[in-house]
C-alpha cells in the first residue's frame, strides 16, 4: 500500500525543489511499500551485510529452510530462530558473528525488548536508539528500517553512499557532500526527507528496492 503521506509529500517537494520535481515526474506510479514483518526485515538486513546480493539470497534461503520460515514472501518466527543452534545457523552460511547477531535479534523480540506495538509512540531517534541496541544493527541499518518498513516520512540517512552520490550528481557538481551540507540542503524537504531520498535513489537505480 502507498504510504498515506506520499501524494502530499510529492506535491510539497515538487513545489520546493526543481530537481525533485523532475524526478517525481520521471517516476510516476511507484512508491515506498512495506514487504514483510519487523523481525524478518531486520534479520534479512543482518544476513545481507557486507556480502553480495546473490550470496545473501542463498544464505537467506538456507536460513528460512532451517528455521521453517513460511509464507510468500517468507517470514521467520523469532522464537524458532532463537531456539536454533549456532552450528545450524553456521551451516546456512552465516559467519559466527552474524549467527550470534541473528540470535540476539530473536532474543530482543521474544523478550519484548523490541516491541513493535510500542513503536508508533516513539519518535525516529528513540526508535533508532532501541534498534541499535541489537548486536549487528548500526545507525544506517536502523535508518533503512525506518524508511522501508516503518515508512517514516522524515528520515535523512546522511551516511548512505547512494544518497551522497545522488546529491553530488544533482546538486554538488560531482563533489561528495559532507553530512552538514546534506542536512542544510535537505532542510526545505522536511517533513518528507524520506520521500526526497527515495526519489534521489531512483535517479541512480530506477528499480525500487524492497526490504
Image (tube, rainbow, N blue to C red):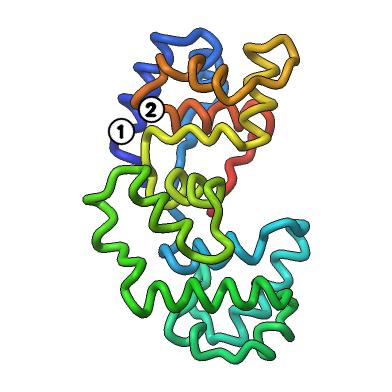
The furthest residue to the left: 121
Dot 2: element: loop
Label 2: how many residues lie within 10 Å, few (<14), some (14-19) or many (20+)? many
* Horizontal side, residue 34 vs residue 101: left or right: left
Residue on which disc 2 sits: 192
Identity of the residue drawn at 68% across and 80% down:
62
Give yes or no for contact between labels 1 and 2 (Cβ–Cβ under 8 Å). Answer: yes
Q: On screen, 57 above or below 153? A: below
**In the image shown, does 132 or 106 lie closer to the viewer?**
132
Image spot of residue 55 (x, y percent): 77, 65
- Label drawn at residue 5: 1
**In the image shown, does 53 or 110 lie closer to the viewer?**
110
Q: On screen, 188 above or below 3? A: above
Identity of the residue drawn at 77% across and 61% down:
54
Image spot of residue 13 (x, y percent): 41, 17
Dot 1: element: loop
* Horizontal side, residue 111 vs residue 28: left or right: left
Q: On screen, 160 above or below 126? A: above
Question: Could you tell me how far apart the alpha carbons at marks 1 and 2 are, in whole angstroms?
Answer: 9 Å
- Whether residue 71 is visible to the viewer of this picture, yes or no, is no
Image spot of residue 68 (x, y percent): 54, 86
Amino acid at each position: 500500500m502507498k504510504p498515506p503521506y506520499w501524494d502530499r509529500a510529492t506535491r510539497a517537494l515538487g513545489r520546493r525543489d526543481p530537481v525533485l520535481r523532475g524526478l517525481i515526474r520521471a517516476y510516476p506510479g511507484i512508491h515506498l511499500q512495506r514487504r514483510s514483518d519487523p523481525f524478518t526485515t531486520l534479520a534479512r538486513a543482518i544476513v545481507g551485510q557486507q556480502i553480495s546480493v546473490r550470496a545473501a539470497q542463498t544464505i537467506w534461503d538456507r536460513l528460512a529452510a532451517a528455521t521453517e520460515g513460511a509464507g510468500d514472501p517468507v517470514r521467520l518466527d523469532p522464537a524458532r530462530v532463537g531456539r536454533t543452534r549456532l552450528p545450524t545457523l553456521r551451516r546456512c552460511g552465516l559467519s559466527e558473528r552474524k549467527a550470534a547477531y541473528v540470535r540476539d535479534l530473536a532474543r530482543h523480540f521474544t523478550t519484548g525488548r523490541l516491541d513493535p506495538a510500542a513503536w508508533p509512540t516513539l519518535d525516529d531517534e528513540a526508535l533508532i536508539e532501541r534498534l541499535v541496541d541489537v548486536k549487528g544493527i548500526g545507525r544506517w541499518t536502523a535508518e533503512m528500517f525506518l524508511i522501508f518498513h516503518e515508512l517514516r516520512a522524515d528520515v535523512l540517512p546522511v551516511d548512505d553512499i547512494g544518497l551522497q552520490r545522488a546529491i553530488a550528481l544533482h546538486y554538488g557538481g560531482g563533489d561528495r557532500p559532507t553530512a552538514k551540507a546534506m542536512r542544510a540542503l535537505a532542510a526545505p524537504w522536511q517533513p518528507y526527507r524520506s520521500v526526497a531520498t527515495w526519489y534521489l535513489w531512483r535517479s541512480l537505480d530506477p528499480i525500487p528496492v524492497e526490504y
